[in-house]
Image (cartoon, helix red, strand yellow):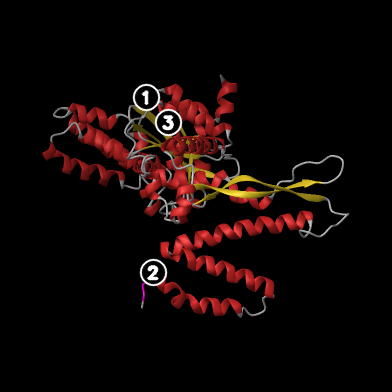
Amino acid sequence: MQDSHTPVPADETAADLGPLRLVSAAAVGLPERLAGRLDEHLSRFVEHMTQGLLAASTAVGLDVVVELMELEVAELAGPKGRHNPARAAKRHGNDQGTVTLGGRRLPIRRPRVRSTGDQERELPLESYATFASTDLLAEQVVARMLAGLSTRRYPAGLEPVGSGVEQAATGTSKSAVSRRFVAATAERLAELLARRLDDRRWLVVFLDGFGMGEHLLVGALGVTDDGTKVPLGVVEGTTENKAVCTRLVADLAERGLDASHGVLFVVDGGKALDRAVRAVFGGKALIQRCRRHKERNVLEHLPEVERPLLQRRLRATWAIGDADQAQAELEALARGLTHKRPGAAASLREGLEQTLTVNRLGVGGSLLQTVESTNPVESMIEIVRDHATRVKRWSSGEMTLRWAAAGMLAAEGQFRRVKGYRELPQLARALEQATADQPGPLDLAVGA
């Protein structure tokens, strides 16, 4: 039996595909006119089978596109060759057009229709508008570029659709692909930064900085009350810059992120992020310092041989459910390090209380693994970096923002609900109780 993926030799097509013609001719319930058209399409399919199944399907598909446009013309202007004085539209010849196919632009003759009466005007064909949509082409370009295909190699990544179609195709040059990718990713950046956030209850927001080339960015990832992870925004700057961090956090508030019932912010330890969150959301924001960042910072002050023991002691202490007891043991651990390892002791004391915020909220189980560190937003950032791995030169901050936004939205399609999402109702209640008497940003402004 011949492999269905193997192109059919020209001298074998008639024998192998003859049964298709018999089936089409005897199509049950089809009018004779339609059965005849189906025979024509099958003949064209057979003609192009020498170049493969996809090439044959493409050739027939282009014929179908033309037929659909002609059907729409008939609906608007009536059957061709039949005079109808009551018609509201008339045929007006043909013109050159293009349609999107497999990441290419292909030339096609499109029929034209004009309205009748004193004020003639061109009537658009919905079928042509659909097939000509450049949005479809932009999706193809972005998907291939994020998958690691360079603009120079873009044509090589397209599906084979037959030599005739490929020779007539346009829009696959390096410059055309680059322009389309820039425009499409700019749209994704605008989409990300314009998302409204006032239609959901946000329980957790992760903030973390990351680098792309020489540029530093800060990204935000939110978690809703049902455990859904959603990219919230990105700015170009550094986690040490308060103005940049405040711009990101303030933008979340302006787009509707409501902290009136409390929100847990998980940050990487940058002081600027801490100050920005408090400045924008006041006491309604609780801050959890990433334990993995804190652990790395402390261990870096120790020789390799001493690190495993301290790491185990840190994790065992953070696992204590009673926040006061855990804090006392961390402070005792810091005192024990003061004489021999003062750098490690100072690092441990810095922001120590914020590493225990989840303990005070009573978070445990699987949900604790989610909110004790910035790992969820770091996973998103890794997807962004993976998509951009072939980029050799970052020419501007705007370029990094476009790539980051495109990667974040692509990552969203891979997200699953967070670990421990069934425990989120308890977190919601704990946040509301812990922040009930705390001033929000408006209260702070009035008090000032």
- Look at the image and say whether residue 188 sits in the magenta stretch: no
Write down the residue under mark 1: 240
Residue kind at label 2, given as amino acid type: Pro
| Residues at marks 2 and 1 touching, judged by CB atoms closer than 8 Å | no
- Look at the image and say whether residue 6 sits in the magenta stretch: yes
Counting other residues with Cα less than 10 Å from the Cα at mark 1, is it few (<14), some (14-19), or many (20 or more)? some
Q: Main secondary structure of the magenta part?
A: loop
Viewer-side residue, 414 vs 37: 37
From this viewpoint, which residue is outermost toward the front? 11
User: Residue 61: image x %, image y %?
Assistant: 55, 60
User: Residue 161: image x %, image y %?
Assistant: 45, 56
Left or right, residue 156 beside residue 285 = left
Q: Quadrant of residue 241?
A: top left
Q: Secondary structure at mark 2?
A: loop
Q: Earlier in the sequence, mark 2 or mark 1?
A: 2
Q: Nearer the viewer, mark 2 or mark 1?
A: 2
Q: Residue, x 57% and y 40% (percent of image)? A: 197
Residue kind at label 3, given as amino acid type: Met
User: Residue 262: image x %, image y %?
Assistant: 52, 39
Write down the residue under mark 3: 399
Viewer-side residue, 400 vs 144: 144
Left or right, residue 311 beside residue 73 = left
Give the Cα distance between marks 2 and 3: 48 Å
Q: Which residues are magenta?
A: 2-8
Q: Earlier in the sequence, mark 2 or mark 3?
A: 2
| Residues at marks 2 and 3 touching, judged by CB atoms closer than 8 Å | no
Residue kind at label 1, given as amino acid type: Glu
Which of the numbered marks, if any, corresponds to residue 9?
Answer: 2
Q: Earlier in the sequence, mark 3 or mark 1?
A: 1
Q: Quadrant of the C terminus?
A: top right
Q: Residue, x 38% and y 54% (percent of image)? A: 366
| Residues at marks 3 and 1 touching, judged by CB atoms closer than 8 Å | no
